[in-house]
Image (cartoon, rainbow, N blue to C red):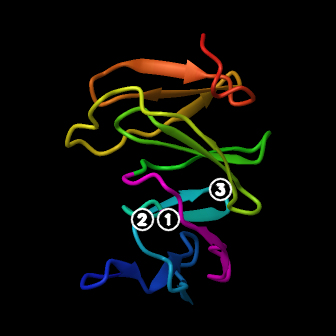
Amino acid sequence: MVDSELDRYRKLIRIDPRTGRRSETPLPQNAIGDATLIGHRLFFVQESGRITLVDPADGTEVWSSPTSVERLGPPTVSVESGTVYLGTASGRLLAVDVGSGDELWQTPARSASSGWIEAPGVAVVRGMVTGVTSSGTAFSLDPAHPQRNP
């Protein structure tokens, strides 16, 4: 449920599909922005670049980290590396440690403009992080060496 005045989610409402039982879990103050549920992790990505991880089972804030990158797209999690990846429409990529919320690295933009579109999501394919810019340029990089040229 979203508070339209503040864009803050106040609670998580779950409905058991077998029984129809409804339960509500209060959410923390930083439950603001675009919400994405990945496995047993609930991420909130604010337009300002703040990323917040919430445990959807009890509504506790696991961590909340500001970044220097605005207008991030939806997160993708690599379970193998314990990393959250996010991208922008200009092709900038950001990697964050899923356990601590610490920024691991970020790349420069790959396009001079982000346009006026929402940032596309990124994907992890065969160990490579892939993304697309607003101009349609597709790219991938090795997350172990994000600054390396292909």
Q: Which amino acid is tagged 2?
A: Gln
Assess whether residue 64 is covered by the magenta stretch: yes
Tell me whether the residue at label 3 lies in contact with that at label 1, contact meaning CB atoms closer than 8 angstroms.
no
CA gap between label 1 and label 2 equals 5 Å
Q: Which amino acid is tagged 3?
A: Gly
Taking the image as shown, residue 63 lies to the left or right of residue 115, namely: right
Taking the image as shown, residue 129 lies to the left or right of residue 4, namely: right
Tell me whether the residue at label 1 lies in contact with that at label 2, contact meaning CB atoms closer than 8 angstroms.
yes
Q: Is residue 50 above or below residue 127?
A: below
Q: Residue at x 42, y 33 (%)?
A: 109
Quarter-of-image position of residue 100: bottom right
Mark 2 or mark 3, earlier in chain: 3
Residue matched to label 3: 39
Judged by depth in the image, the label closer to the viewer, 2 or 3, is: 2
Mark 3 surroundings within 10 Å by alpha-carbon count, few (fewer than 14), some (14 through 19), many (20 or more): few
- Extreme residue toward the top, this view: 150
* Label number found at residue 46: 2
Residue matched to label 1: 50
Q: Residue at x 71, y 56 (%)?
A: 98
Q: Give whichever of 69, 73 is nearer the camera.
A: 69
Q: Residue at x 34, y 27 (%)?
A: 111
